[in-house]
Amino acid sequence: MLRRVLLALGVAFTALGVAVAAAPSIATTLRLPDVPRLVVAVLAVVFALATHAARKAVDFRDPDEAAVRASGLEDRYEPPRPGAEIDAELALGPRDGPSSADSRVRERLRLLAVRVLSDAEGWSEDEAHRRLDDGTWTDDRTAAALFSEDVDPAARHLVASFAGIESTREREVRHALAELQRRSGAGVGGD
């Protein structure tokens, strides 16, 4: 209630100040005192005291009450981030031999590659599958090696794999995704 009163007084005094500044004859009509500094000072003190009184009247919650009130609220739903499953599977690290997680990642990437190549290059799905199997869908041998057993990655990438910098699988996936992104035009231009 006090806030509304203070708001109304603030609006009224602002309007009065604008009116007096626009037409000084209003000050003589309303018989305002000749010493406006005194009036402004008195109003400032009154508003300061009113604000202080309003702040003292506010009851702040203690932490226990806040925890009780927050416990009745619903948990915030955090939708899954696109690609989080693949990130989790890739984060498991290199495997000994083929695993079900590796084959699922490769199959999902293969489906993505077929869609991108069909859309971007105008190839049929059969043509895209054939080119993925042959390794002729890209000039990047590392990317082609992800889908084709006949293509060997470049020797410099094998050195990085032996040095433990990056696994062969991670590098092949990274190269394939970069090539597919380039072909699809995703992330190009824009903002």
Image: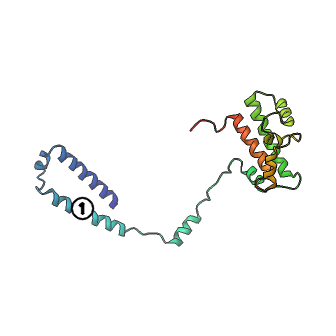
Q: Nearer the viewer, residue 165 or 46?
A: 165
In the rendered structure, the answer to whether residue 135 lies left or right of residue 64 reads right
Above-or-below relation of 138 to 34: above
Image quadrant in which the N terminus is located: bottom left
- State the residue position of label 1: 44
Image quadrant in which the C terminus is located: top right
Rendered location of residue 94, percent (x, y): 82, 55
Q: Based on the displayed image, in which of its 4 quarters is residue 188 positioned? A: top right
In the rendered structure, the answer to whether residue 5 lies left or right of residue 167 reads left
Name the residue rendered at 71%, 51% in the picture. Answer: 84
Name the residue rendered at 89%, 53% in the picture. Answer: 97
Rendered location of residue 14, percent (x, y): 25, 51
The total of numbered circles placed on residues is 1
Q: Secondary structure at mark 1?
A: helix
Q: Residues within 10 Å of mark 1 (few under 14, many from 20)?
A: few
Above-or-below relation of 48 to 95: below
